Every structure is written in structure tokens, then in C-alpha cells.
Image (spheres, helix red, strand yellow):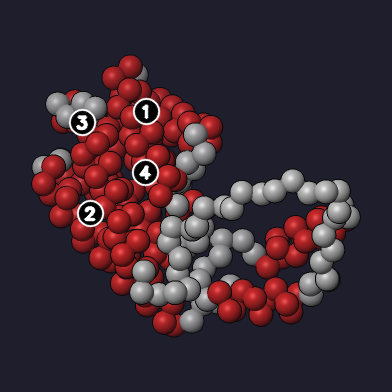
């Protein structure tokens, strides 16, 4: 999907501000150079989701905070139990993905976050579980708060997404919807003017599957 130039610039400014804040927090933690690099890389990926795709389910507050926290915790525990760096790295990322799935906080940058304690090595052992909360947890929280404030003036950039309204039980009647053409989808996506992490083809395929069930 093609977004307007205005939308692209807004996303870039927001992401840049977020990393500026995170980098400042990271300096306060006085991590090693490797730790700084990995943390900034992980949060940089989160910034792309938060500011370029604020409507994505992967960008919502629980996904960001839960994804980073559980992944960091897994990284700390795996690093303490597994001596081999390669094996520890694979286990940390794999377990982080599984945990995020079950906790419904899937956030791709969490994979990188799970590697931070392992890459830090002995230098990070002095931090222990504190590393999970600071600077990782505080950085994730700061980015979420910034995303809320930054997106507030822009009516078409809702962040976070509103909670789903409670559904009421139907009386057996099935709602009927008119057919939607490919052109309708394209026009609707153009009106949204924010990145939607699903292709037009996938949307059309979902609609075809849905209409077959009527």
C-alpha cells in the first residue's frame, strides 16, 4: 500500500524522536558498547512498528511491553543456564517466540531483546533481573507513552487502538453485506493513509473465504 508523503514524514519524525529518548535512557544504564548496540537495534525495530504501523496489532501497548519484558526475562534465564553462546541464542529466541505467542504479546523486536543478556555476557551478569526492568522495560514504556502523545494530534493515527466493544448474542439472523470489489478495497485503504500490514490480495482472499460461509 502506498501512503502519502505526509504520512511517511510523520512516521520518520516519530521514530527518530523515540530512538533519541531510548538512547538517552540507555546511556544512563551504562551498558557495554555491545549492549547499547543490541538494545538500540531492538528498540529501533519497535519504533518502526509504533510509528510507521501504529494500527498493527503487533504495535499495541501489551505487545510492546509484554514482548520486550518476557523476551528479556527469557534471555536472562537462558544465559544463566546455558554456557554455549550459540545454543543459548537459539534457545532464547525460540522460547521468546513461543512465550509471546501464548501470552498474546507477539512483538518481532522481542527476538532481538532476548539476545541482549546473552551478548552482554559476563558484563551483564551484574545487572541480573534488573536489566529486564531497566533499561529494557523503561525504554519500551517510554516509547509507548511517546507514541500516544505523538499520534494524538493526528486524527487518522489512532494509538493505541480502542478496545473491542463487547459483542451481543445474535437471535439467529445473519447479517447480509453487499459485495466488495477490488476497487473498493483500494479506495478504502487510500482513505486510511497509514501502513496496513496486510496486502490487498490477502484482504480480498479473506473476504472470499467469508462470503463462502454465508
Give the spatial CA distance, label 4 vs label 3.
15 Å
Q: Quadrant of residue 146?
A: bottom left
Reading the image, the residue beneath label 2 is 22
Q: From the image, tell me which residue sits under label 1.
A: 74
Q: Which tag is nearer the camera, tag 2 or tag 4?
A: 4
Mark 3 neighbour density, 10 Å: few (under 14) some (14–19) many (20 or more): some
Disc marking residue 65: 4
Residue appearing at x 41%, y 41% in the figure: 67
Foreground residue, 37 or 77?
77
Residue, far top? 81
Tag 2 secondary structure: helix
Q: Which of pointers 3 and 1 lies earlier in the amino acid sequence?
A: 1
Residue 190 placement (x, y as % from top left): 59, 79
Residue 178 at x, y = what percent? 83, 71
**Could you give the CA–CA distance between mark 1 and mark 4, rounded to whole angstroms?**
14 Å
Q: In this view, does 80 lie to the left or right of 100?
A: left
- Label located before the other in sequence (2 or 4): 2
Q: Residue 130 carries which label?
A: 3
Sequence-wise, the earlier of marks 2 and 1 is 2
Residue 6, quarter of picture = bottom left
Give percent across and percent down for residue 13: 31, 72
* Residue 151 locus on image (x, y percent): 37, 68
Out of 71 and 55, give the one closest to the viewer.
55
Amino acid at each position: 500500500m502506498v501512503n502519502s508523503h505526509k504520512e511517511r514524514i510523520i512516521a520518520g519524525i516519530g521514530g527518530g524522536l523515540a530512538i533519541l529518548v531510548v538512547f538517552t535512557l540507555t546511556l544512563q544504564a551504562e551498558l557495554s558498547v555491545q549492549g547499547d548496540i543490541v538494545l538500540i537495534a531492538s528498540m529501533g525495530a519497535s519504533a518502526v512498528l509504533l510509528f510507521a504501523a501504529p494500527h498493527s496489532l503487533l504495535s499495541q501497548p501489551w505487545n510492546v511491553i509484554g514482548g520486550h519484558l518476557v523476551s528479556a526475562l527469557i534471555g536472562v534465564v537462558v544465559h544463566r543456564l546455558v554456557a554455549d553462546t550459540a545454543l543459548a541464542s537459539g534457545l532464547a529466541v525460540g522460547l521468546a517466540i513461543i512465550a509471546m505467542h501464548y501470552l498474546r504479546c507477539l512483538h518481532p523486536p522481542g527476538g532481538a531483546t532476548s539476545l541482549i543478556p546473552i551478548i552482554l555476557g559476563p558484563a551483564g551478569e551484574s545487572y541480573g533481573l534488573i536489566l529486564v526492568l531497566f533499561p529494557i522495560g523503561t525504554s519500551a514504556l517510554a516509547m509507548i507513552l511517546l507514541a500516544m502523545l505523538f499520534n494524538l494530534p493526528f486524527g487518522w493515527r489512532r494509538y493505541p487502538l480502542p478496545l473491542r466493544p463487547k459483542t451481543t448474542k445474535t437471535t439467529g439472523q445473519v447479517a447480509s453485506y453487499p459485495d466488495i470489489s477490488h476497487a473498493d478495497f483500494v479506495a478504502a485503504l487510500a482513505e486510511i493513509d497509514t501502513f496496513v500490514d496486510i496486502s490487498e490480495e490477502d484482504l480480498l482472499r479473506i473476504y472470499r473465504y467469508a462470503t463462502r460461509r454465508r
